[in-house]
């Protein structure tokens, strides 16, 4: 067998012969608030404290034009305390988002328990609530899964609205994660590497069902401001996301972990950013110590560069394709980079 015949797809990393203008953007065109960042564990069991030095990370982000960041990795209990201690030197730089424990859902004192939790979080200086995908994907109360539109959760949304806190919601993963990881699945390599991300055989959840729950959440809680993470949960269908934004003024979206999806549809994405410039928040899904992602985001948003990688790492997380820049106008950049976040956070 020749060397050519022995090459496997997973080892295929072609060097592009395309010669076009290329820009390296070290700093953004204006200050940045990253509304979707993580300073705790990637996985709950990780001893993340040794992964980074908090003061050094803060300075590295500032060097890249990040004036503020929202920390979304807080969990109730011990991990929460560990991260608070780790990031305390970053107070004033971080907006803290935290989850509400809903394990008492259905009990008589659930609403009072929610209010007590909000009070404790307010004392900690929390700025908003984060709803993790495990609400529907993993959590069960009395043997039954909890979905976003569960009427019993209304106490949570109403309390957030009363306090003027935004609620960040991770409602679903990409549609490809709900399909078989076969040769026709464009995210097959990721799913083979991370089988727990594949929900195709879970009869209790579907991407369509989660989107129905998401829309009901927006429709039935119009006084609550929701940031639907990851470009409204459906960056590969911006037409539908736009319809939701048109229908629900209480909905905002962030760009976190959507660079590969947005960058492969530059015309559609540019039109979307232009039309919904007041409703899009800049977010990366950054984990402390991985600052290289910012330069790629700035290149996408600020240049017309063609066919460049959407990740610094070699393995094709996010899809085996390259992306294109959309070169937003300065006015739009300012809104996306920091003005919309300031409005949502009341800062």
Image: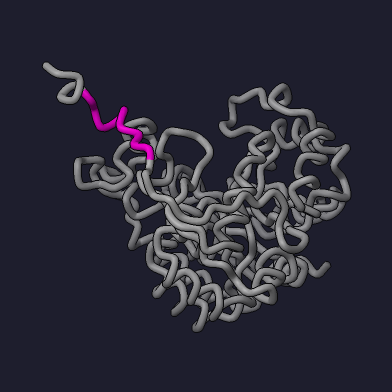
For residue 274, above or below residue 163: below
Residue 202 is inside the magenta segment:
no
**Residue 164 falls in which quadrant of the image?**
bottom right
User: Which residue: 64% across, 65% down?
Assistant: 281
Q: Is residue 75 left or right of residue 42?
A: right
Q: Residue at x 56, y 54 (%)?
A: 256
Residue 326 place in picture, x, y as percent? 52, 66
Question: Can you see residue 153?
Answer: no
Of 213 and 143, nearer the camera is 213
Residue at the spot x=45%, y=57% of the render? 306
Visible residue check, residue 209: yes
For this orientation, the residue located farthest to the bottom is 247
Q: Which residues are magenta?
A: 7-15
The quadrant of the picture occupied by the N terminus is top left
Residue 214 % position (x, y): 47, 66
Q: Considering depth in this image, is 24 or 261 the residue closer to the camera?
A: 24
Left or right: residue 96 versus residue 332 is right
| Residue at image point 59% right, 25% down | 45
Residue 96 on image: x %, y %: 76, 50
Q: Position of residue 112 (x, y in %)?
A: 72, 57
């Amino acid at each position: 067998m020749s060397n050519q015949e022995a090459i496997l797809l997973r080892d295929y990393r072609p060097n592009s012969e395309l010669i076009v203008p290329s820009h390296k953007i070290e700093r953004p065109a204006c200050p940045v608030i990253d509304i979707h960042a993580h300073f705790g564990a990637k996985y709950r069991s990780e001893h993340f404290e040794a992964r980074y030095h908090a003061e050094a990370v803060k300075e590295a982000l500032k060097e890249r034009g990040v004036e503020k960041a929202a920390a979304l990795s807080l969990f109730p209990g011990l991990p929460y305390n560990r991260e608070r201690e780790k990031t305390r030197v970053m107070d004033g730089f971080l907006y803290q988002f935290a989850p509400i424990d809903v394990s008492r859902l259905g009990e008589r004192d659930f609403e009072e328990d929610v209010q007590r939790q909000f009070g404790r979080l307010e004392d900690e200086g929390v700025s908003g609530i984060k709803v993790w995908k495990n609400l529907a994907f993993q959590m069960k109360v009395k043997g039954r899964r909890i979905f976003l539109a569960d009427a019993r959760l209304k106490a949570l949304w109403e309390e957030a609205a009363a306090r003027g806190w935004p609620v960040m919601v991770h409602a679903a993963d990409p549609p490809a994660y709900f399909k078989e990881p076969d040769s026709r699945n464009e995210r097959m390599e990721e799913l083979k590497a991370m089988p727990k991300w594949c929900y195709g055989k879970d009869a209790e959840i579907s991407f369509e069902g989660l989107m129905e729950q998401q829309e009901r959440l927006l429709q039935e809680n119009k006084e609550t401001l929701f940031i639907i993470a990851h470009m409204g949960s459906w960056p590969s269908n911006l037409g539908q996301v736009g319809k939701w934004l048109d229908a629900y003024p209480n909905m905002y979206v962030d760009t976190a972990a959507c660079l590969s999806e947005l960058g492969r549809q530059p015309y559609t994405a540019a039109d979307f950013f232009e039309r919904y410039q007041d409703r899009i928040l800049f977010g990366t899904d950054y984990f402390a110590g991985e600052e290289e992602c910012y330069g790629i985001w700035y290149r996408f948003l600020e240049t017309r560069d063609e066919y460049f990688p959407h990740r610094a790492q070699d393995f094709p997380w996010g899809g085996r394709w390259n992306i294109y820049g959309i070169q937003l106008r300065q006015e739009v950049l300012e809104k996306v980079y920091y003005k919309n976040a300031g409005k949502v956070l009341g800062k």
